[in-house]
Image (spheres, helix red, strand yellow):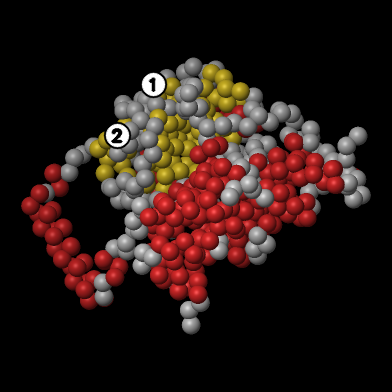
Amino acid sequence: MTARIVLTDELLRRTLEARAANGVTMDALVDDVAREIAWTSQTRTARWTRMSGPARLLAAASLAMAAVIGLVILGPASRPTTLEFPVATGGIGEDALTAGRYRSAVFAPPLALTVPERRWAVGAILPTELQLRAVRPGQSADDSGRLTVLRIDNVMTGACGYGGNARWPIGNGDPQAFVTWLQGQLPANLAAPRPVTIAGRTGLEVEVRPSTELKQACDFGFLLTAVGTEANPMWAEVPVDGRRVRVAAIAVSGRLVVVMTAGAWTNEFTDIFSDADAVIASMTFE
Amino acid sequence: MATVAEGLVVRARRGDQLAFQALLEGRIDGLLRLASAILGDDDDARDAVQQASLQAWRELPALREPARFDAWLGRIITNACRTLLRSRRRRRVREIPVGSLDERSDIAGAARSAPDPGQRSDEIEVVSRAFDRLSADARILLALHHLEGRTISETASLAGISLATAKWRLHMARAALERALEIEQR
C-alpha cells in the first residue's frame, strides 16, 4: 500500500523548484522581447502630472470654467437619458463607465441601471450574465468587487459543479426554491435568508459567510450556472474563498434572476456593497 | 547615490531600449522561474514573461522611484500570471473525482521515513497536480513565499495586500493545497 504524502515545507519547495525548471530558452525570449519593444511606444506621463503647482491650479480653474460654460450652453438635456453599454456581445469593457443610465438588450430580459462616475466597468455582457466590475484606484481588474446579474436557466450540480450541468427544475423562477437548493449545494456557511426587493420584485437574499473551514474541492468558487456557449463554455461562479458574497434571487416574468455582489480581497466590503446597493436600487427589467 | 540598475531604469524610462534590455537580461531567469512555478506550463510561462516585459516597457515612464523597479516588475509578472490563469480557467473545468468532501484521511499516521528518489519524484508529481487545482492568487502567494523565499511582508507588498491579509491568505492557500492533495490521492 502506498504511503500518503505529507505536505511539508520542504516538499512544497522541491515541487515548486521542479515546476520552475522550465525548458524555455532565455536568450531567444530576450531577443523576442527586444524585437517587440522596438515597435512599441512607451506610455508617456500625462502633461498634467508634470505641471508645477500654480500651473496645475490654473489649468484646473480653466477646465472648471469650460465645464460650467459647456453646461450653461448645452444644458443638461443634451445628455442622452439612456446609454447602451459600451461593449459588444460577450465583450469585455476596459474603461470605467461614465455616470449615466445604461441599458442592455443583450442580457435577457433587457435591463437598465444607473452608475455613478467611473466607479464601475463592464466585466461581461452575455444573454444570461451581465457583470460590472468595481473600479478602484490602484486595484487590479482581477481583484475587484463584482456585481453580477444572472438569468438561471440551468445549474451546475454537486460541489464545484462536478456533478454536471442540469436544467433548473423549478420553472416558475421561485426564489425560495432556489435559495433552498443553494443551501443544500454550497460548500460554505450561508446566513439566514432575508427578504429583498429588486426592481419592484420581492425575493430572497443570502450571504456567504467567510469561513476558515470551507470544504471545497476546487478552491476558487462554486460553479453556479453555465453562461457561455457550447463552443465557448463559461460558468458564473460564487466565490467561496472567504470573501463576502451576497446572492439575491427574484423572479422576472416567470424566470429566475440572481443578483450577486462579491467583495474583493483588497478593498472594503462595505464600500463595494454600498456602491452596489445604489446600482441595484436603480435596476429595472423590461 | 544611484545603483547601476537604477541608472539603467532612468535611461530605460527615457526610452533607451538597450538599457531596458540590459535590465531584463539580469532578471528574465527569475521571472521565468516564478511564472513556470505558478503556471506549470513552459509556453504559458513564456507568454506571461513576454506580456509582462512589454507592459513594463510601456509603463516604465510612470515608475517614479527607480529603486522600486524590481518590486514593480514583480507585481507586473504576478498579474500577468493571474490574468493568464483566470482566462484559461474560465474556459475549463478540471475533472475531479466526486466523493464526500468530508472524508478525511489520517495523514498524521502516514509513513514519515525517508523515501527513495523514485518515490520523491512521484510525490513531487502528485503535489504538482494538486498545486494545479489552486486559484491564481493561492499559487502566486505560495510561489513567492516558498520558491522565492520572500518574507510575508515582501509577499504582501508584491501581491498588493496588507500584511494581515497576506498571512491569512497564505494560511488558506496552504490549507487548500492540502485539501487538493487529499483529492489527488484518492
Q: Which mark is residue A75?
A: none
Q: Quadrant of residue A277?
A: top left
Q: Which mark is residue A253?
A: 1
Compared across the picture, whether B147 is left or right of A236 comes to: right
Alpha carbon of mark 1 to alpha carbon of mark 2: how far? 18 Å
In the displayed structure, A68 sits above or below B173; it is below
Q: Between residues B36 and B93, which one lies in front from this camera angle?
A: B36
Percent position of residue B173, x then y: 66, 49
Taking the spot 33% from the left edge, 33% from the top edge, the residue there is: A88
* Of residues A252 and A9, the one drawn nearer to the viewer in this rendering: A9
Q: Can residue A213 be seen by looking at this rendering?
A: no
Residue B164 against residue B175 in the figure, above or below: below
Mark 2: which secondary structure? strand
Q: Position of residue A146 (x, y in %)?
A: 45, 43
Q: Are marks 1 and 2 on the same chain?
A: yes
- How many marks the image carries: the answer is 2
Q: Amino acid at mark 2?
A: Arg
Q: Where is residue A52 shown, x and y percent of the image?
A: 26, 75
- At label 1, the amino acid type is Ser
Q: Which residue is mark 2?
A: A103
**Position in image of residue A247 (x %, y %):** 51, 37
The residue sitting at 54% across, 47% down in the picture is B46
Q: Residues within 10 Å of mark 1 (few under 14, many from 20)?
A: few
Q: Quadrant of the C terminus of chain A?
A: top left
Q: Quadrant of the N terminus of chain A?
A: top right
- Write down the chain letter for disc 1: A
